[in-house]
Every structure is written in structure tokens, then in C-alpha cells.
Image (cartoon, grey):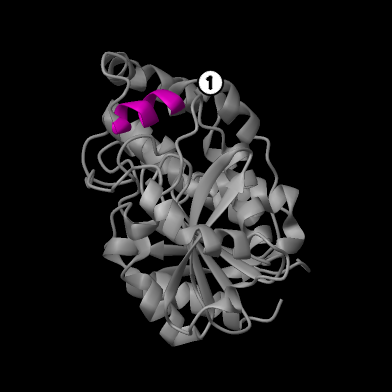
Amino acid sequence: MSRTPRKRRSAYRVLSALAVLTLTAGAVTACGDNDSAPEHAPSSSATASSSATATASATPSASPGAGRPGVSKLHVITNDGHRLAFHVTQGNGHTVVLDSGGGEDSSQWKDLVPKLHADTGATVITYDRAGLGKSDVVPGPWKAESAAGDLISGLEQLGVTENVTLVSHSQAGEIANYLAKDNPKMLAGAVLVDANLPPFFTDEEISRLVAASEPQVDVAKKDPDKPENRRLISTAEGFAPAHKAFHKVTWPDSVPATVMVSEKTPFDGSPVDVQRWRAAAASFVQDGPDRTLVTAEGSSHDVPKDRPDLVLKEIADMLATPH
């Protein structure tokens, strides 16, 4: 691992169009080569069995402390008419929220959650974004602002309104930036794991991504009901204006951040994009106080899978560092 000091307030393959949208917009398979993540809306039986949980967790009096220690509990919350599945492992004090990469549901973190909970004693929350896992599909273009609204609403309904350490992989970096901008008091800190960051999405880079994705989008439109095709299409819709706006988002100085960059980056094989990805991470760190840049040596873009030890270490360090 290589690391640059935190600045205090006082001072795998040749790039393809499929990789572009998968790894930078998260439309298809989650930042990697695994396309097996389950996707379905909650079944009637699942909804019925969890209705009491959903109702309880939607009240202000409910909190992640309402379950047994070390046991994950499903909470189904509703926001803007659609249901979202949140999985809460009760702990004490700190709350860590793990937000998956594009195309991945909460199962991306299934091996890390027990270890994180055991090592830190924190409450650990994972969730399925709209259209993934046990959460409802939401038609139309994918919008990071809406996804951030879903996460904020879900946490508030669970009674979690402050002292959150947010861990965001890949596409979830966009959600993290909007959440931090709109609700900085909710966050105690963030660990951004090879995450989408505003400096990367220059007009030139956006044009490259859009042009590269066009053939895959055209193919996907021939079978729009296929889950991975639907995600690709929804991400491609309005991609340019959405990411021009994202490029202007500013991370609040009040929220500490650790920025992890994989050794190979999402663009292994495309030197131009590799350099831009790394430069964006470095720029993000330099643009504000209390930010640290960490390189995940030996890792592909799928850092949670390749270097779970490092992800755990950086989360633990964030929890332990007074801010």
C-alpha cells in the first residue's frame, strides 16, 4: 500500500466500451466481470414476511439497535413510491454504511460485513439500490441525486441521522458526493473506494465515454427488458448532462475522506484514462482538508474483493481518527 499524508485544514483489460459504462457508470455488471448479482423486486411473500419490520423501521423511534447483535436484519423502507431493502447488523456507537459499485447489490459486501462488525463493533448497514437485489425497479434514467435521496431517506427512516461513515465503491462515489453536499451533518467521514469523483468527468472525458458506449447501448435497446440491458440504457440516458453537473459538485470541507485508488484502475490497458483516473483522485484529495490518498497495490477495480484487508483497515482508521 502506498499512501500520501492527509492534508489538514491548516495548510484489466484494454479499455472497451462495455468496460467504460460498467466501470465508470455502473450500468451493467458492477465494476467487474461478475454478472450474477440477483435482481428482483421484493416478492409478495418476502414483502409480507417483512411488513412488520418495514413498518417498525419507518418510525422515528426505530433504530439499527432494534435487532440482535451480529445478526443482519432486513428492513424494507419506502421512498417516493418504491421499496428499498436495507440490511442492518446491529452494533454500538458508530454506523458504517457500505454502498456497492454499479450493478452490484448488497451481496457485494457479504464477506466483509461480519469481519467489519467483529473488528469495530459498529452498526453495519448495506442496502440494495433501486432495481437491484430486493429493491423495486424505478423506470427512467439513473440519477445519482435520486439514489442519494433514497439512501438518505432510508437512513433517516432507520433512525440514523448522524455519525455515519460512508464506504462507497465505484458508481456509488457519485451518490456519496451528492449525499455529502446535501447532508454533510449526517457524515462523520467517508472511504471512497476506486470511486467516481467529479474531477474525472471533464467535457473531453464525457465525450469519450459516450462515444465508446454507443454500440453497446444500441445492442441493449434490442432487448431492453433484460436486467443488465435496462441498467445500461438507464445509465446512458442523459449521461452527458448528468455528468457535466456532477463535475461541478464540491465535497464539503467538514467531511473527512479517504480516497482509495486501485493499482490497475478501471481502465487497465488505456494509459490515457488510467492517468486521468489517478489525476482525478489526486485532485480531489488536494482540493480540500482532511483528505487522504491511498493506492490499493495489487488490486483491480474490484478493491473490496481483491483487497478486503485494506478496505477494512481504512474503515477502522477512519472510525478511530478524531475529526
Q: Residue at x 31, y 13 (%)?
A: 218
Location of the C terminus by quadrant is: bottom right
Residue name at image x 50 percent, y 24 percent: 140
Q: Magenta segment: does it hold 42?
A: no
214 left or right, relative to 16: right
Left or right relative to 116: residue 254 = right
In reply to whether residue 228 is colored magenta, the answer given is yes
- Highlighted magenta segment, given as a residue range: 227-234
Q: Position of residue 315 (x, y in %)?
A: 50, 73
**Can residue 123 be seen here?**
yes
Local crowd size for mark 1, using a 10 Å CA cut-off: few (<14), some (14–19), many (≥20): few
Disc 1 marks which residue? 238
Q: Give SS at disc 1.
A: loop
User: Residue 192, position in %: x, y?
Assistant: 51, 58
Place of residue 88 in the rendered image (x, y in percent of width and height, measured from the top left): 50, 69
Please determine whether, in this image, residue 18 is positioned above or below residue 323. above
Which secondary structure is most common in the magenta stretch?
A: helix
Task: Give the residue drawn at x 63%, y 55%.
Answer: 286
- Residue 236: x and y in percent read 44, 23
Task: Give the residue type that dot 1 points to.
Answer: Gly
